[in-house]
Image (cartoon, rainbow, N blue to C red):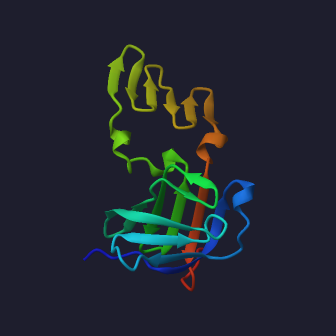
Amino acid sequence: MVKTLRLGTYEQTSFIAPDHLKDSENDLVITQDPQASKKIWVTNLVAGAKIYAIVHTKTEDNIVYKIPAQMVNGYAITVGCVMYDIEEQKVVVSINNKGNCYGISQSDYDKSVSIGKDGIKAGDIQVGSNGTIKGNGADISKDGVKVDTKKIMAGVQYVGQKAGSDKED
């Protein structure tokens, strides 16, 4: 039997967002849409606004919701996802960071794969014949790891623990 998202209140453990969106001290609240069984509402993530999300994938361990494009309190959401870990009772919400929600959109799979003298390229990831790896804001080479934090931490990243559940140490 596939479990479902625990509706209710989540206490913030981590929140990265543009300064103008971090005004709320309220806990995140997730509610079921009264008319659509695959739709949830996420409240208090973007300055008290309500954002909706639709079920994308369910497994025994987690549930992933897609946040469709929408405008909330003057903030344009172009891509987003809600990921819920059933065992840990944790929710992760990512908005406007395509890398965090990779695989939710069909366009993520429409990119070609090529093999050539310079290495392998699959979508936005390139593995060079010299062993370098580039893509999605991180480059790995013999010189070390370079991370484009602006790209990796773009948008809104929220991690919360179900209120009343055991917290991590």
Q: Identify the image quadrant of the N terminus.
A: bottom left
Residue located 40% across and 32% down the image = 123
Name the outermost residue toward the left: 1
Residue 26 figure quarter: bottom right
Foreground of the two, 85 or 28: 28
Q: Quadrant of residue 39?
A: bottom left
Query: Residue 161 location in percent, x, y?
Result: 56, 74
Query: Is residue 72 positioned above or below 142 on the image?
Result: below
Disc count in the image? 0
Instruction: Say whether residue 142 is left or right of residue 31.
Output: right
Residue 108 % position (x, y): 38, 41
Q: Quadrant of residue 36?
A: bottom left
Give x and y (percent) for residue 30.
Answer: 50, 75
For the residue pair 43 and 34, the one nearer the viewer reads as: 34
Spot the residue most to the top.
117
Q: Which residue is pictured at 33% across the width and 28% down the height?
A: 112
Is 115 placed left or right of 80 in the picture?
A: left
Looking at the picture, does residue 126 appear above or below residue 13? above
Of 48 and 169, which appears nearest the observer? 48
- Quarter holding the C terminus is bottom right
Considering depth in this image, is 127 or 17 the residue closer to the camera? 17
